[in-house]
Image (cartoon, grey):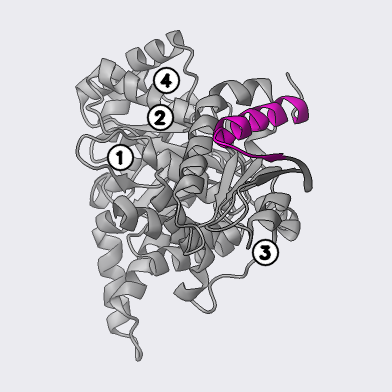
Amino acid sequence: MDKATAVELKKCLGIILSLSTNVLYYYPPSKRTQYFMNQASNRHSVNVSGVIIGGNAPIVVQSMTNTDTADIAATVAQVQLLYESGSELVRLTVNNDAAASAIPHIVEQLDARNCQVPLIGDFHFNGHKLLSQHPACAGALAKYRINPGNVGRGKKRDQQFSEMIEIACRHDKPVRIGVNWGSLDQQLLANLLTRNANLADPLSLAAINRQAVIESALDSAAFAEEIGLPADHIVISCKMSRVPDLVEVYQTLAQKCRYALHLGLTEAGMGDPGIIASSAALAILLNQGIGDTIRVSLTPEPGATREREVKVAQQVLQSLEIRSFSPSVTACPGCGRTTSEYFQVLAQQIQQELDASMPTWKHDYPGVEAMKVAVMGCVVNGPGESKHANIGISLPGTGEQPVAPVYEDGLKTVTLKGDDIAREFIGLVKNYVKTHYASS
């Protein structure tokens, strides 16, 4: 994520209260861990090939490929990219025979690369046929996603839904019942609209849509249990494209059920608008202890790689101090006191160095992902912010004495001078990692 996007994301998380006066209750970090544990303990724990969703497990980051699943080489490459970027679950489209046939080969090639990420099959319309006609696919996938809005109409709906759930039971696979407001069960929606029309004070269409996605998810989950799928094999989601709708839907779901919840704003969009909308929705719900796994559904820019959505999801969790994935760099935005770009360049260099080092550090130095580094541009907030970080540097602003004190764990350890401050400070950061985080 570039610096400008990260700044916008942090602004978004900081002003989230403006979305609704009664939606967000802020829990400071000191109280948040226990609050989350109390909320999470009410959720069923779902095991997806060793990755736990719900219960007291950490919130899981997941993503989805956009390759043609039948293109085995391209799909394997993208899954590995997403996995190496931090995606703990990866979903694949399974929309035809070629895609279903490719799944076992994709899993085999990923295993050969030691890419141990559980794969989720995304089924619409014909999933009952594909799972029954391709048992190797059904066995190779770690989890199925079923959209109850498009598994069939009338009597066929229940029959085809039942077929998929029965296959999941035979293979002992968990299922996400994933409702999307853009593909609602039309019969359910029609029934709700008819009932609503007879009310003395009818609800708005938006309210009916929210009610419909909730009923679809909960009714389908209850039906799956009747068929034989255990509650601890069920994850549910109700995707909406408007932030207030998503928040209200999931607040209701959290009160009505104990199923593990998958969060995500559908069709969030491209670039900064998509990042900010997803971050706003997820931050509100996560801060209330709602949500067990998340995906940021960004539209990638033409030619762009797919992993940005993973980094945004991680940054949301890290900004809320729910999970840590990589050392964070605090840097001031700059003002008239910092007419030089020196501190900005140094902050960028530090972030790049941390990102490049993390693949090795996360194995050699457990806990380093929570480290905080401060790179400040002048004397106003520089010393204070640097003292609050694990290690920080306060660079001189315009007209200030050309020295840069360095602080470690709140104490000034050295003052850097001259033209080689950047290289020297990077060396100090690396030394801090080696001396403060136990080697495995």
Residue 159, above or below 255: above
In this picture, which residue range is highlighted in magenta? 415-436
| Marks 1 and 3, the one that precedes in the sequence | 3
Task: Identify the amino acid type marked 1.
Answer: Gln
Task: Identify the amino acid type marked 3.
Answer: Tyr
Residue that lies at the very extreme toward the top in this rendered image: 112
**Is disc 1 in contact with disc 2, using a CB cutoff of under 8 Å?**
no
State the CA–CA distance, disc 2 to disc 4. 22 Å
Say the numbered circle drawn on residue 27: 3
Q: Front-most of 328 and 126?
A: 328
Residue that label 4 marks? 139
Residue that label 2 marks? 82
Report the residue at 49% width, 36% height from top: 349
State the CA–CA distance, disc 1 to disc 3. 44 Å
* Callout 3: SS: loop
Report the residue at 53% width, 65% height from top: 14
Q: Front-most of 86 and 101?
A: 86
* Callout 1: SS: helix
Report the mark closest to the observer, 2 or 4: 2
Left or right of 373, for residue 97: left
Task: Identify the amino acid type marked 2.
Answer: Leu
Task: Please state the horizontal and vertical placement of residue 72, each as a whole percent of the image.
Answer: 27, 17
* Callout 4: SS: helix
**Is disc 3 in contact with disc 4, using a CB cutoff of under 8 Å?**
no
